[in-house]
Image (tube, grey):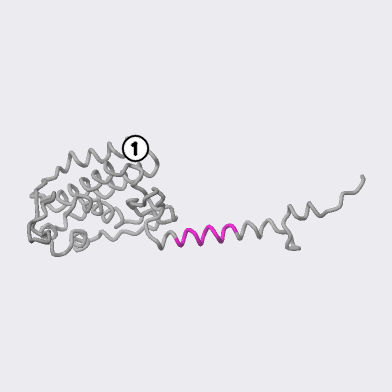
Amino acid sequence: MELAYYSDYAVRLVNTEEPARNKDSLTSVEAVRELFGASSQAARRATDSDVTRFRSVRGRLRAVFAAADAGEETQAVDLLNSLLLEFPVSPQISGHDHRDEDGRPKWHMHLADHPSNATAGYAAIAAMGLAFHLTEYGVDRLGLCQAAPCRNAYLDTSTNRSRRYCSDRCATRANVAAYRARKRLESERSGPTGRTAETSQETTPVTDR
């Protein structure tokens, strides 16, 4: 795996909760294992105790996205650095899953599973992946969805740094809401005759007082 791949670990964990909708899918050890992928060795080490620990890490990762989304770059970096210090990674060179056309290994950096517990392993990978994305592309590439009430995290990979929503669905919903708001405003500005207030003023004859 490339290091950029690991940044999605942070997004997946943060988005297990929707605070504005009072929803939380991280309620069981099975949910923890799904974050890793059921077949991974780290997933098999997960226990019920990891549910609470995962939620704690999730809150700290969300704080990183929230700070970045608010333009607080230094705060976002400080929060992420605290995670990196608490959950150090174990990098290894790997080539077992990637071969070139001649069958030779394509060596790349790989983050090994953490030996202590499932939470420490996932947190280390998520923090390192997010740190790679932040330093490679910029703090402003981390964001929270602007389609209220959704506040899902996302990583902006657009060429012009224009992403504002976590998904196409939320982007469409926001655009529809904005369109309807404009139509309502136009309707409110229109009088009973269907003319806007400005048009009505222009066509009203001026009389001597």
Looking at the image, the residue that sits furthest to the right is 208
Residue 80, percent across and down?
25, 41
Residue shown at the point (86%, 52%) measured from the top left: 205
Q: Is residue 205 magenta?
A: no
Q: How many marks?
A: 1
- The answer to whether residue 198 is above or below residue 73 is below
Assess disc 1: are there few (<14), some (14-19) or many (≥20) residues with their C-alpha within 10 Å of its C-alpha.
some
In the displayed structure, does residue 110 sit left or right of residue 190?
Answer: left
Residue 176: percent from the left, percent from the top?
Answer: 51, 62
Q: Residue at x 44, y 56 (%)?
A: 147
What residue is rendered at 42% in x and 60% in y?
170
Q: Quadrant of the C terminus?
A: top right
- Quadrant in which the N terminus is drawn: bottom left
**Residue closer to the observer: 106 or 152:** 106
Residue farthest to the front, as pictured: 102
Q: Is residue 144 left or right of residue 194?
A: left
Q: Is residue 10 left or right of residue 41?
A: right
112 relative to 145 in the view: left or right? left
| Start-end of magenta stretch | 172-182
Q: Residue at x 14, y 53 (%)?
A: 118
In the rendered image, which residue does mark 1 sit on?
73
Foreground: 41 or 160? 160
Q: Residue 196's x, y, as percent?
A: 72, 57
The percent coordinates of residue 17 (x first, y second) are 32, 56
What secondary structure do most residues of the magenta stretch adopt? helix
- Give yes or no for residue 178 being in the magenta stretch: yes
Dot 1: element: helix
Depicted 118 relative to depicted 30: above or below:
above
The amino acid type found where label 1 is placed reads Glu
